[in-house]
Every structure is written in C-alpha cells, then in structure tokens.
Image (cartoon, rainbow, N blue to C red):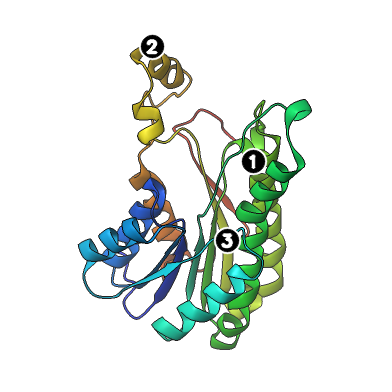
Amino acid sequence: MLNLEGKRALVTGAAGGIGRAIVKTLHGQGATVGLADVAAEPLQALAGELGDRAHIFVGNLADAGAADSLAKDAAAAMGGIEILVNNAGITRDNLALRLKDEDWDLVLNVNLSAGFRLARAVLRTMMKARWGRIVGIASIVGATGNAGQANYAASKGGMVAMSKCLAQEVASRNVTVNCVAPGFIATPMTDALSDEQRAKLVSGVPSGRLGLPQDVANCVAFLVSEEAAYVTGQTLHVNGGMAMF
C-alpha cells in the first residue's frame, strides 16, 4: 500500500472523471488534497465525500495569472505543495482548415501553458525541500496524432516534451516529473455512444475494454509515491495495448 501521509497534493481538473479518481486515490493514501476546477458545485460534492483533508479552489486556468494565483492559494491553505497533478484539459476539435485561432490558443493555454506555470510556481519550494512530484496527464493522441485534434494533440505532446525538460532540471533535488497518457477511458461521453460505436472503439484495444478512470489514477498514485523516486522524465501509457511504444 502506497503511503502519502503528510503530503499535500494539488490536482487540477478535479471535477472530471479522471480528476475525481485521482483525488480519491491520493486522499485514500493519506494525502491532503487540493481540488481545483472551474465549477464550485461538483468540487463541493467531492469534498463532501472525502471529508477532512480536502480543500476547494475554483478558477479558470484560461485566465491570465490564474495558475500563479492557484498555486499561491493552495500552498497557503494546505501549508505547502509536495505533489502537483496537471490534469485540467479541454477540447475544441475541428479540422485544421476550420480551426479558429481562439480555439487553438484556448486549448494550448489551459492544457499546456497553465500546467507549465503551475509547475514553475511549485518547483522552487519542492527543490528547497528536496522532495517533490509533478505528473502531467497527457494523452495517446499526443504521440499518435488524431485528425481534427491538432490543438489538443499539440498540447498533450507539448506536455510530454515540457515534462522531460523539467525532469532534467530538477532530478538532482529528488523532484520527479512524469506524464501519464490515457487511451480510451470510459467517461459520460463514451457512455452516450451506441453499442455499435462502443464496439468499434473496443475492437482496437487488445485488452478488450475501455479503460477506467481508476486505471489512470493508480498510475498517478505510483508516480507520486516514494516508491517511484527513480522514475523521472517518463510517460506511462495507459491504453490497454492499443498503441505500444
């Protein structure tokens, strides 16, 4: 059993399916958790499920300065941040010829730039403490690409490249930076698919099923643990074998 007692974790995108699973898993291992997202109501509901050691932070990471403010507020409320999980992400899908500048900018700002700013904001104290964990939630499309998702794929591929750079800069201080790249994960969106559409998705997955948010959360929990101290600059693909790197 991984033990995160005494650690304080900030998780962005905490209201979504994967974010909720990550928060619950880290909290279950003893961590104090900061729940960050744009809507207060689902965060309040999640915090109510968790009970103690849960803090809510509402804000839009698309806004200039939001990441720095979030890092400052979370550190003040929790007494510090040893773990950062950059999970917040949005899509604005369209074919490249129809993709608007504002949709490119918005996706890159939320999915990549905000994650960099949060990492930059917490790294100094992690390095001083000589212990820290940063995990970015990337995506299989960051490695394979996907038609109609140039902005999203670029943001996720950028997350991987950025994490490798940060990992090299801070490894000597016992701070690790890694990514988890999910494949097809069961979400409310996939629940709305027809049986035929769902079967088509699953047919491309050797494991024969869609992934669960908990599959992703389990990998995050390992990467932020003491047991993963010698793992940095890596991307852990969680996709049931649909793509093997």
Amino acid type indicated by mark 2: Glu
Find residue 114 and report its horizontal and vertical position in percent: 63, 62
Where is residue 81? Give x, y as percent.
Answer: 48, 78
Q: Earlier in the sequence, mark 1 or mark 2?
A: 1
- Return the x and y of residue 38 as percentages of the image width and height: 46, 58
Residue at the spot x=57%, y=76% of the render?
69
- Gap in Å between the C-alphas at discs 2 and 3? 36 Å
Foreground mark, 2 or 3, reads 3
How far apart, in angstroms, are the residues tagged by discs 3 and 1? 16 Å
Name the amino acid type tagged 1.
Answer: Tyr
Indicate whether 128 appears above or below 235: below
In the picture provided, is 187 more to the left or to the right than 85?
Answer: left
Left or right: 140, with 209 as reference point: right
Instruction: Inspect the image, locate mark 3, and give the three-letter code of the amino acid beneath it.
Output: Leu
Q: Nearer the viewer, residue 174 or 216?
A: 216
> Position of 29 compared to 115: left or right?
left
Residue under label 3: 61
- The x and y percentages for residue 186 are 37, 34
Q: Find residue 196 and name its label.
A: 2
Tag 2 and tag 3, C-beta contact below 8 Å: no
Say the numbered circle drawn on residue 152: 1
Sequence order check: which comes first, mark 2 or mark 3? 3
Residue at x 58% of width, y 50% of height = 235
Q: Secondary structure at mark 2?
A: helix
Report which quarter residue 201 is drawn in: top left
